[in-house]
Structure formats: C-alpha cells, structure tokens
Amino acid sequence: MIEAVGPIKRKFAPWDDPTLKPFIRFENVTKRFGDFTAVDNLTLDIYEREFFALLGPSGCGKTTLMRMLAGFEQPTEGRILLDGKDLSGIPPYKRPVNMMFQSYALFPHMTVEGNIAFGLKQEGMDTSNINTRVAEMLELVKLEKFAKRKPHQLSGGQRQRVALARSLAKRPKVLLLDEPLGALDRKLREETQFELMDIQMELGMTFLIVTHDQEEAMTVSDRIAVMNHGIIAQIGTASEIYEQPASRYVADFVGDINLIDGTVTAVDDDNVTLHCAGVDATIVAEAGAGEVAVGAEAGFAIRPEKVQISLEAPPAGTPNVLSGEVWDIGYLGDISVYRVRLAGGSIVKATVANLTRIVERPITWEDKVYLTWPADAGVILLK
Amino acid sequence: MAERWTQDVKPFLAKWALVAVPYLWSLLFFLAPFLIILKISLSQTAIAMPPYVPVIGSLGDFWAKLSDFTFDNYVFLTEDPLYYSAYLSSLRIALVSTILLLIVGYPIAYGMARAPKSLRNALVMAVILPFWTSFLIRVYAWIGILKPEGLITIALQSLGILGPDEQIHVYNTETAVFIGIVYSYLPFMVLPLYAALEKLDATLLEAAADLGCPPTKSFWVITFPLSLPGVIAGCFLCFIPIVGEFVIPDLLGGSETLMIGKTLWAEFFNNRDWPVSSAVAVVLLIILVVPIVIFQNQQKKA
C-alpha cells in the first residue's frame, strides 16, 4: 500500500513563538528630512530566516527604513538592533548587511567576476577562496559563461543576477532588496521571484524586500508590512493581509475591493448587521476582531472574486443580496470582471473564473443580475 | 528628371554641403598656412622682402626653383643644442604644469560635482568667468602680484612674516611660469574633470560602502577609475597648448626659462630668420602630433 503524500506544507511562523528573539528590531524609529517625516515612530520586529516585505506606495517611507538598516541614513529618533546589537554609529561598510540596489549599481569598469569579488576583497579574503566563492555565486545565478563580461555587455535580466550574486557573495546576515525586480518584464519577474525564494531557503538568510508591487510581496514573502505615510498600516502574512485587512487603506491598497458604506444596526456574538442606505440593502457580516457598536458608521469590504453573480433571483429571505444591472464586462483571459451598477448608482465588481472555453457567456451587458455572498466572505471596516 | 533632382541629387548635395564646411575651414585656415610654413622652412634666409629665397610666384616657378629648396634649417636645428634643450624644457614644463593642474583641478572639480545641484551652475560659471577678461591682462596682473615689490611681498610684510627690507623673489623665475600656467589653464582641466565626475552615479559609492569599502578607498577604486576619461581629456587639453606657450613664459619667466615658443618668437622677430623659425614650428607640430593622436584614440574608445 502506497500512501498518498500531499505537498509538504511549510509551517514557518517564528513571529508566533514568544520564546524567539527578533533578529532585526526597529525600535520607535523616526526619520525626518527637514519638516517631512519619512518614518514616524515605527516599531517592527523581523525574525531570522524570514523573507519580509515592506509594501507601500512611493513616498511611504519603506525605502528610508531599509536605507537606515543599511546605514545610509541615520534615524532621527529611536534605534535599530541587529541580532541584539545596536547599529547606531556603525558606518555602512562595517554592517553585516548587504543590499541589492534598485538600479543594480554595478561597477561599470569591472567585469562580472570583479563585481562579485569586490566585497570579498574588502574583507581581505585570500585569492583562492575568493575564486571559489565567485564561482559558486556565478553558478547560483547561472551566469558562469558571462564571468569576463562588463556590465554594459549584459541584458537587464543578467545585470539583475550579477547584482544579486554580488550582494549575496559575502554571505550577509541580512540581504536587503530594494525593488529588485522593478526593471524586469513581467514573465522574467515572475520567474525571478520564485528563484529568489529558492535562494533564500537554500542559503537560510534573512531577506528584507522593499516593493510597491503587491503581487511580488505576496509571492515571495513570509510576512508583509503594509506602510503608509511613515507608519505600518498592517503586518501579517499575505493571506492575513488580503483576507483580513485591518483598515480601508490596506483593503484598498492590496488587491481589488468593493467597499459599501453603511450604519451598524445590530451586533450579536457572531454577526454584525449593516444598513446601507446608499444601495438600499441590509448586509450581515461576520463580526471582525474590532469592537463594533450599534449606530457606528462602518464599511463592508468584499473582494470581487467572492461575489457571486447570477441572473436568477435567490430565494426570498436570503441575506446579503444586491441587485443591479451589468454596466461593463472586462475579459482578462483567466477571469472576467463584471461591473454591476446598483440602484443607488454605485458600482460593485464581481469576478468569475473562465473555467471553460465557451464563447457565449450567459451574462451580458444591461442584464439584471443578483449579487450574493456567504456571511463570512467580507469584513466590516470602521471608518 | 525633376524627381531625380529632389530625390537623389538634392539630399546628396545638402549632405555634402554640410560636411564640406568644416573641411573647407580646415583647408583654408590650417592646411594652407601649414603648407606655406612648410615651404618657408625649406627655404633659405636672404636680406630681401620677404626675407627668404626662393619666392614662388607661380606653379611654373615652383618646378623651376625646386632645386633651391633645402633641409639645411632642419639640420641646423640638430646642430645647435639651444633648440634641443628648448624643446626638452618645453616638454618638461608642460608635463610638470599638467601634473600640477591635475593636482589642483581634481579637488575643485570633485567639490563642484558633489556640491548641491542648485549651486553647480554657479560654480561652473565661476570657473569660466575669468575668460571674460583678456588673457593677456590676467597674466599681466600676475606681474603685479608676484614682483618683488608686489602684492605678495606687501601682504607678507604687513603680516610681519617678512621684514620691511625683505622681498619675495618669484617673478622672473620658472616658479612664476608654473603659477601663471596653472592659473591660466585651470578651466581646461577642471571642466572635463567636472563633466566626468558629475556623471558618476552616487549609488556606486553606496554600493561600495555596502560591500565593506571605506570612503577613502572607494575614491581610489571607484571614483578615480571612472573619472579617467575626464583626467585624460583634461591633461591633453592642457599639455598640448602648454608646450607651445609663449605669452606666460615671456611675461612671467626670466631669461633662464627656456621654452620653444619664446625661441620661435626670437628667431622670427629678433633674428628675422623666417626659415629657421618655420622649421622650429614644423618640428613642434610633429612632436605634438604624437600626443594628439593618442588623445584621439583614447576619445574614440571612451
């Protein structure tokens, strides 16, 4: 009898283990440039071997946070600890962290080998060891054939690999990745994301990635910190952030969301009832973690893929029904997006996976449709 | 027919007319004078007007008087050690000045390139500004500064460093020539260096620091090698004209400062020996062609 073995599910959650000490700790860190506050009294713990993403729009302070860890910027207030050691006053060239720059910052007058060996030479490693390590790194990023080339003789993707190899060569305790895949095209970017994950697991290092691309953050990282205006809006795993957004900002920034505003009319142990005057409907949703009081202004947030769209009216008494007219249809290949206009004029998006190759789809423009969802499909967000 | 004119002939002519302008310019103002100098250098001095023979009036003359041409002037240059040492001295002064210019100019260009963006244009202006005054006047001004009873002496006396009877004797020495040359040629060194350093991506230095390289070392392994095209351009832009420099050694240098430009002037105006001075000029040109060719090859590579 051969037992069927499913895929091994990796359970890696050091942040849930109270006995573990964080590897990197930002402690009440504030950074001001003139009267602009880039990072505002921020505290963040990152654990050893974690792949951690800082996600946010440009100007949210994520790059500044990373540059402070690398030593290029000094915190105005607060301190940064690495492995329990305060980093303040330690110049960048003495910190056991390496960075992969967004522009790659390869040395144009040096060969690929020279670039990768640069950090090792600074350490004073002897030549034979340097050669071994450089060869290892070239193999890791599959650039053995390009060792003698100069950066300008490489493609964008190859340069990106050299930059990665160079930042990994010194085996830093922490690797910082600043928008590492921003310059690559979509296909290459996806491939490289998975390669990055493999490399991180293989080398067992702590990776900190800065990105504005939510897909990238969700793909590669163990945990994500969503940032906005110098503070952390939410920290969690990709699914926590996607399924249980802590605020409207997070819900809106990560993925697509329908937000319906209303007033809380009833609260019990399991459910919150929301009367939405704008769309003339009553919505019942599972009570979230936050305290919700009757009479409070709140919003109901639901992802488009959790909204079911149907031409037939659900049986009477079904909770959570919205009706409207198909306003627009977007065909994206794998899914179709239906934009449904409700009675009050607001638009709710519903996505449907295109599981078959049918050409005629039953729902079309100007059809009257019903939107439904189970009670646990959305979350209540306070204003 | 008309179609052929607009489609083939007209663009062809337009293209060549554009290219012809610089060639015509070089032909008129460089090649023609050079051929005249070359011809004079192969002539012999004479007490006449112009002071040499043969004088060529027409092309027929040229063939008739071909036998009168001589290499005597070039042979003469090798016989008198004066010329030999004047060439060597010019090359030495040009080399030392270029090194001094690099040492003085590099920090200036580096500082300009690292200055806040809003200040950079003003700093470039400050480097160019002296050009708005006559070169000759600026060199004369140095006489007033350097002469024994000049500004430096007065300043040092008033500070009590020099006694009331002591004076600084820089004027009419080679030191004064170096001061004058470094002052006059500084923009030619600073501007190409600045252009090279300004292009330098500051994140390269961050990357070097990130990989464990302290700032002083990263200057030598990153900044300096990447500014080499600017260093080479600046050095050649200074070295080549300094070799033939006449005004500065004439005004600031003493009689012991021997430079080929001064020798040429003396041959031409004091001795009225046009053929020998022409030969001096032709040899100088040949000496300078070597670094110019190296410079051009370097520029092509960059």
Image (cartoon, rainbow, N blue to C red):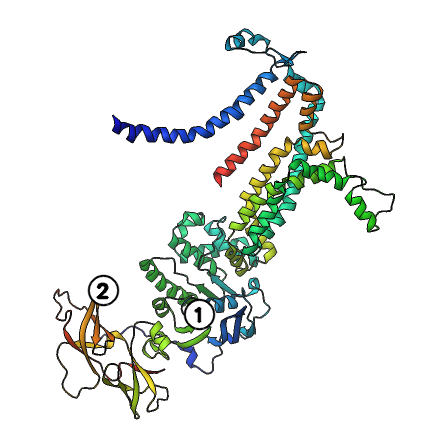
Q: Residue A125 falls in which quadrant of the image?
A: bottom right
Task: Name the residue carrying label 2.
Answer: A332
Task: Give x and y (percent) for residue A236.
Answer: 39, 77
Compared with residue B270, is residue B124 higher up or lower down, i.e. above or below?
Answer: below
Instruction: Indicate the secondary structure of the residue bearing disc 2.
Output: loop
Task: Decide if residue A303 is on the left or right side of residue A87.
Answer: left
Instruction: Name the one closer to the observer, B236 or A152.
Output: B236
Would you say residue B182 is visible in this rendering?
A: yes
Instruction: Name the one closer to the observer, A230 or A352.
Output: A230
Task: Decide if residue B86 is on the left or right side of residue A248.
Answer: right
Identify the disc placed on residue A60: 1
Would you say residue A3 is visible in this rendering?
A: no
Query: Which corner quadrant holds the N terminus of chain B?
Result: top left
The residue depicted at 57 percent of the width and 8 percent of the height is: B67
Residue type marked 1: Cys
Compared with residue B32, is residue A77 higher up or lower down, i.e. above or below?
Answer: below
Task: Give x and y (percent) for residue B199.
Answer: 51, 50
* Cα gap from disc 1 to disc 2, whole angstroms: 31 Å
Task: Give x and y (percent) for residue B295.
Answer: 54, 35
Residue type marked 2: Leu
Label 1 CA crowd tier, 10 Å (few <14, some 14–19, many 20+): many
Instruction: Give the chain of mark 2.
Output: A
Label 2 CA crowd tier, 10 Å (few <14, some 14–19, many 20+): few
